[in-house]
Structure formats: structure tokens, C-alpha cells
Image (tube, grey):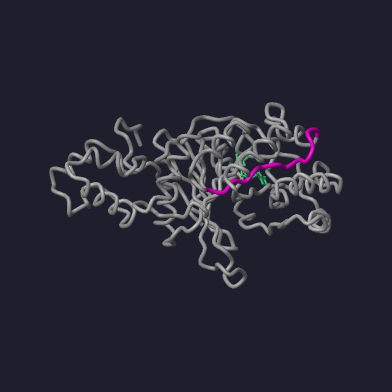
């Protein structure tokens, strides 16, 4: 796919599109074709006059991502590898709630990427191994969700911005994409069903606090003291814990919303009961919920997950101190979901061999 000169229509707000049409109802017709009927081409938009369709085709790109392949895990998590106009690869994951086990068995969560690669170089993460290449455009973020809907046949109800990249380092494009996904004229996904996860960029957390969009915020903490966090997250040198926690407090007070701390458990690094107690104190101070995630091993990296008993003991400390703490049962481990690993595998096998075919 050559890099297009025209802007992608999926990065436009309704009012911006209306300004380019001879009448606002034309914009609504176009938006319906894109977001309700998932049109494949402008030519398909048959209730628009032919010359107008030609104008659209000459003025806008319609697609921002191309499906390279999809993989299913046994727990029905599906992973998608998409190619962008410049050939870059990104991953998107569809995580259905387990039917029968939760009250929301009809929930379908899409995990989207926001950058090609990542600049923050967390030591345990596959996404940052080769640095960051570029930001995704708003259209490239929106189109991930549309393609997953189309390919899976499932209506997306929740979005987690936890794929490749640091969303708050691509602030404007990410917020634009989320406003579009949230808008009633696009997918209408409730703001409270959208979660942004950040490595801990304190200034942007404050900026997000001042934004009226009521999305949820999750912080990748992974260490309850500077010495432990610094070992695995270089960003902690720039924004140490006290600065991060103060930004979280500002968010909590300004928005009146609770945050979530994500804490991956890595054997011998951050899984001591002392860390659990210190994490409990931080979480209690912010009334934050804690998501404990046993580390998902990455080929070539030395980190391992603690055994189940140790994870449980860590969780018990938090619970005994009155902190809500869930211990995640992984989904998608067998397809290397959620951690940049499918892309990594494919990148490593290029250009000599094509990516593995679906399934
Ligand atoms: N940059 C953002 C969002 C992308 S990462 C952030 O840092 O939050 C989404 C989550 O997956 C983060 O909490 C990240 O630390 C975590 N993660 C990365 N690699 C992982 C792995 N191998 N196992 C488990 N979680 C991982």
C-alpha cells in the first residue's frame, strides 16, 4: 500500500466532515456507511450522488489498516496483525468475557495499539525492544476497532488502550480516536467502557484529568518503591513515584474517578511481601483498585512469573489491608497476546519468509 496523500476519513469528527459537504445530512449518510454498514469503498455508498462519491474518493482515504493475519487462542482470545500504509505492523487483540463465568458474557473488549513500537523501554516488555518508529494516526486507531468488528462479527463493547505504544505520548491522536469511537454518530462506545493505560507520564495524566472525556485510567505501576520500579521501568527516572502519585491524586480529585494500578508480578523482582505492603499503602491513599498480572514471559528476556501460591500471597496482603485486588487469569498466553509478541515474531521472520498463515 503506497502512503496516501489524502487524509483518512476515519480521523474526522462529524462537524469537520459536515464542513466539507454541501449539506450536513450528507455527513451523516457517510458516517452511517462507515460506522454502521462498514462500507468497503466510497462507490458502495449508493444513496450519495455519483459525482459526490467521486469527490469523496478523490479527497479521502477510507482504509487505514490492512489485515495481515489473525490467530485464535484456545480461550477464544483472537489476535490480529495489521499492516499500515508504510508497511509497519501493529497488533490488536479481541478479548471476549468468558461465557457463564461473568455477568457480562456478551462483553467484547478490543485492545488497541497507539504507536509503532514504544520509546519507554520497560525491561520486561516486547513492544519497546526496537524503540519507537512513529505515532499512529487517529484513523489507524479507529480502524483497528472497525476491522476487529468486521473480522470477528462481534460488536465491540469495551476498549482497552493497552496494545503497543504509550498512549499518552501520542496524546492528541489517541484522544481524537477515542472521541470518535465514543461518539453516537460513530461506534457509540461508552466513555466508561474505555480504559487508557499509561507507563506513568505525570504531566499528561494531569492534562487528561482536565479533559472532559470520562474515560478510565490505569497506571502501569509494577513497582511500589523507586528502587524496584527503576530497575524495570526507565521512565521512573524522569517521573519518579512521588511525582506520579501526585498526578494520580490530581486526576482522582479533578475527575472524581477512581484509578486502577496494574502490577505485573515478576519473580524475584517485585513480588516480595514488602512490595505488597507498600503497594497497599499507595493504593489505599488513592482508593485505587489493583490488577495483579502474573508476568507473561517474552522469548529472549530473562523474566519469569512467580508461582501461583506466591501471587496469591501477594494478593492476600492487599486484601487484608482493604484494597480491592484482582489476580488476572491470563487469556491468550498461547498466542502471545497483549504484549507485542506476535509482531515481534513476524518482524524477526521477515523479510526471508512470509508471516504464518491464519490458524
Ligand atoms: N504503554 C502503556 C500501554 C501498553 S502496555 C503502559 O505502559 O501501560 C499494557 C500493559 O501490559 C502494561 O501494564 C505493561 O506493563 C504490560 N506488559 C507489557 N509486557 C508484559 C508482559 N510480558 N507480561 C505482562 N504484562 C506486560
Rendering quarter of residue 241: top right
Q: Position of residue 90 (x, y in %)?
A: 50, 41
Q: Specify the farthest residue to the bottom.
A: 100
Q: Tell me, yes or no, if residue 312 can be seen here.
A: no
Q: Tell me, yes or no, if residue 164 can be seen here.
A: yes
Side of 154 relative to 60 (left or right)? right
Membership of 224 in magenta stretch: yes
Q: Residue at x 68, y 47 (%)?
A: 262
Q: Residue at x 22, y 52 (%)?
A: 44
Chain part drawn in magenta = 215-227
Membership of 13 in magenta stretch: no
Q: Residue at x 74, y 45 (%)?
A: 285
> In what quadrant of the picture does the N terminus appear?
top left
Side of 248 relative to 164 (left or right)? right
Q: Specify the farthest residue to the top.
A: 238
* Along the viewing direction, whichever of 228 and 249 lies nearer the viewer: 249
* Along the viewing direction, whichever of 352 and 229 lies nearer the viewer: 229
Q: Position of residue 219 (x, y in %)?
A: 65, 43
Q: Position of residue 275 (x, y in %)?
A: 82, 44
Quadrant of ligand 1: it is: top right
Rendering quarter of residue 75: bottom right
Rendering quarter of residue 173: top left
Q: Residue at x 75, y 36 (%)?
A: 229
Q: Position of residue 296 (x, y in %)?
A: 69, 49
Side of 51 relative to 307 (left or right)? left
Amino acid at each position: 500500500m503506497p502512503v496516501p496523500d489524502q487524509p483518512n476519513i476515519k480521523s474526522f469528527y462529524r462537524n469537520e466532515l459536515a464542513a466539507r459537504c454541501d449539506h450536513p445530512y450528507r455527513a451523516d449518510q457517510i458516517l452511517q456507511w462507515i460506522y454502521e454498514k462498514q462500507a468497503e469503498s466510497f462507490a458502495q455508498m449508493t444513496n450519495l450522488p455519483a459525482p459526490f462519491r467521486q469527490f469523496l474518493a478523490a479527497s479521502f482515504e477510507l482504509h487505514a489498516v490492512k489485515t495481515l493475519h489473525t490467530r485464535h487462542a484456545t480461550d477464544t482470545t483472537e489476535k490480529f496483525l495489521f499492516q499500515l500504509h508504510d508497511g509497519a505492523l501493529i497488533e490488536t487483540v479481541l478479548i471476549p468475557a468468558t461465557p457463564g463465568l461473568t455477568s457480562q458474557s456478551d462483553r467484547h473488549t478490543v485492545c488497541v495499539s497507539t504507536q509503532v513500537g514504544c520509546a519507554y523501554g520497560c525491561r520486561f516488555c516486547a513492544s519497546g525492544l526496537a524503540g519507537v518508529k512513529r505515532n499512529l494516526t487517529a484513523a489507524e486507531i479507529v480502524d483497528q476497532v472497525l476491522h476487529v468488528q468486521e473480522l470477528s462479527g462481534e460488536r465491540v463493547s469495551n476498549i482497552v488502550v493497552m496494545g503497543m505504544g504509550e498512549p499518552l505520548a501520542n496524546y492528541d491522536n489517541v484522544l481524537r480516536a477515542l472521541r470518535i469511537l465514543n461518539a453516537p454518530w460513530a461506534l457509540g462506545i461508552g466513555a466508561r467502557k474505555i480504559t487508557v493505560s499509561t507507563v506513568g507520564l505525570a504531566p499528561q495524566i494531569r492534562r487528561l484529568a482536565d479533559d472532559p472525556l470520562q474515560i478510565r485510567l490505569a497506571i502501569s505501576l509494577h513497582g511500589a518503591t523507586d528502587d524496584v520500579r527503576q530497575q524495570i521501568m526507565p521512565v521512573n527516572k524522569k517521573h519518579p513515584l512521588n511525582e506520579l502519585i501526585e498526578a494520580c491524586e490530581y486526576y482522582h480529585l479533578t475527575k472524581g474517578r477512581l484509578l486502577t494500578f496494574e502490577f505485573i508480578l515478576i519473580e524475584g523482582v517485585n513480588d516480595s511481601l514488602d512490595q505488597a505492603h507498600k503497594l497497599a499503602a499507595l493504593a489505599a491513599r488513592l482508593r485505587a483498585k489493583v490488577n495483579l498480572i502474573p508476568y507473561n514471559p517474552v522469548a529472549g528476556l530473562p523474566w519469569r512469573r512467580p508461582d501461583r501460591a506466591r501471587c496469591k500471597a501477594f494478593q492476600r496482603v492487599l486484601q487484608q489491608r482493604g484494597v480491592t485486588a484482582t489476580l488476572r487469569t491470563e487469556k491468550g498466553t498461547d498466542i502471545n497476546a497483549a504484549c507485542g509478541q506476535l509482531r515481534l515474531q513476524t518482524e524477526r521472520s521477515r523479510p526471508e519468509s512470509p508471516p504464518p498463515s491464519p490458524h
